[in-house]
């Protein structure tokens, strides 16, 4: 019998690897849509763009985002390799609307063309991390320029991002904490250095060969049977209503369990919770 769902639809009880893959898709799409919204705001606030041009550009940005949302298929990318220069060019494309219509100057320092190809999973995650980092940096006052540099030492993808802002960011800033959790889930490292009045600099290292692993064993979380059931469904990509129906509980009860899971695991989002549950 033919499945009524499209190839990338979310099914409740897939394998753990498929669940982790879906979690990465959710995290990536969240950053993509955040970038799109920032770009839309930049267009609408631009004093150099006429109302008609701004409206048409906003429509084009929204349409492009919708096409990307419907067409995304992380499964194929995660099973393939992507040349590092191609992966970097795709990142440039992701950030181009924000650069074009905002007051932000993003300088791209390209990686060596003959650098080692990136596993699709790493390339995909690296773009999401850089998008999240750029959005975190531009939240500061006075940021006019950001430099993004990729390199590869043969074993790790090395990412350097620097701004010219106020240097107010700290490792405890919510946006940086989220990025740190995502990098750690990839067995990578993130170092932040900020100097008041001089700006902030992030250095990220993502291993190309080390398999993903949870920060702590799931068995050490001390989950109840009900929490384990909720966690399995969250990791599958199910939303609160679907979880409530599957477990015959109310949506408010689902929210209560999800909040407890986030606290016990140390995650800040459902996507992180799902990724760490692998």
Image (spheres, grey):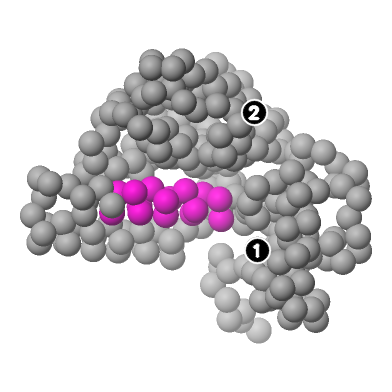
Give the image location of residue 86, x and y in percent: 39, 35
Looking at the rendering, which quadrant does residue 109 occupy?
top left
Instruction: Write the start and end of the magenta stretch as one range.
Output: 26-40
The residue tagged with tag 2: helix, strand or loop? loop
Any part of residue 232 in sight? no
Above or below, comparing residue 202 to residue 275 in the picture: above
Residue 31 lies within the magenta run? yes
Which residue corresponds to mark 1?
237
Decide which of 56, 141 is in the foreground and name it: 141
Which residue corresponds to mark 2?
188
Residue 144 lies within the magenta run? no
Give the image location of residue 76, x and y in percent: 54, 52
The answer to whether 170 appears left or right of 162 in the picture is right
Q: Distance between the residues labelled 2 and 1?
A: 24 Å
Decide which of 181, 24 is in the foreground and name it: 181
**The N terminus is located in which quarter?**
bottom right
Q: Residue at x 30, y 63 (%)?
A: 63
Give the image location of residue 152, x and y in percent: 51, 20
Above or below, comparing residue 174 to residue 53 in the picture: above
The answer to whether 46 appears left or right of 119 in the picture is left
Could you tell me what secondary structure mostly forms the magenta stretch? helix
Any part of residue 131 in sight? yes
Decide which of 92, 118 is in the foreground and name it: 92
């Amino acid at each position: 019998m033919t499945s009524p769902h499209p190839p990338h639809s979310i099914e409740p009880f897939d394998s753990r690897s498929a669940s982790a893959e879906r979690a990465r898709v959710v995290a990536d799409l969240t950053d993509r849509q955040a970038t799109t919204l920032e770009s839309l705001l930049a267009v609408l606030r631009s004093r150099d763009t006429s109302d008609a041009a701004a409206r048409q550009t906003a429509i084009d940005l929204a349409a492009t985002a919708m096409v990307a949302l419907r067409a995304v298929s992380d499964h194929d990318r995660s099973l393939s390799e992507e040349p590092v220069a191609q992966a970097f060019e795709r990142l440039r494309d992701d950030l181009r609307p924000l650069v074009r219509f905002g007051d932000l100057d993003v300088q791209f320092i390209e990686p060596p063309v003959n650098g080692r190809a990136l596993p699709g999973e790493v390339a995909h995650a690296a773009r999401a991390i850089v998008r999240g980092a750029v959005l975190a940096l531009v939240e500061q006052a006075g940021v006019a320029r950001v430099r993004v540099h990729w390199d590869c030492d043969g074993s790790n993808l090395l990412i350097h991002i620097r701004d010219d802002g106020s240097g107010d960011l700290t490792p405890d800033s919510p946006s940086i904490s989220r990025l740190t959790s995502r990098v750690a889930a990839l067995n990578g490292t993130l170092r932040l250095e900020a100097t008041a009045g001089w700006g902030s600099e992030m250095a990220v290292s993502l291993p190309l060969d080390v398999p993903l692993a949870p920060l702590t064993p799931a068995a050490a979380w001390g989950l109840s049977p009900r929490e384990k059931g909720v966690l399995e469904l969250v990791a599958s990509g199910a939303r609160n209503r679907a979880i409530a129906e599957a477990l015959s509980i109310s949506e408010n009860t689902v929210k209560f369990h999800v909040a407890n899971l986030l606290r016990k695991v140390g995650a800040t989002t459902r996507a992180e919770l799902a990724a760490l549950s692998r």
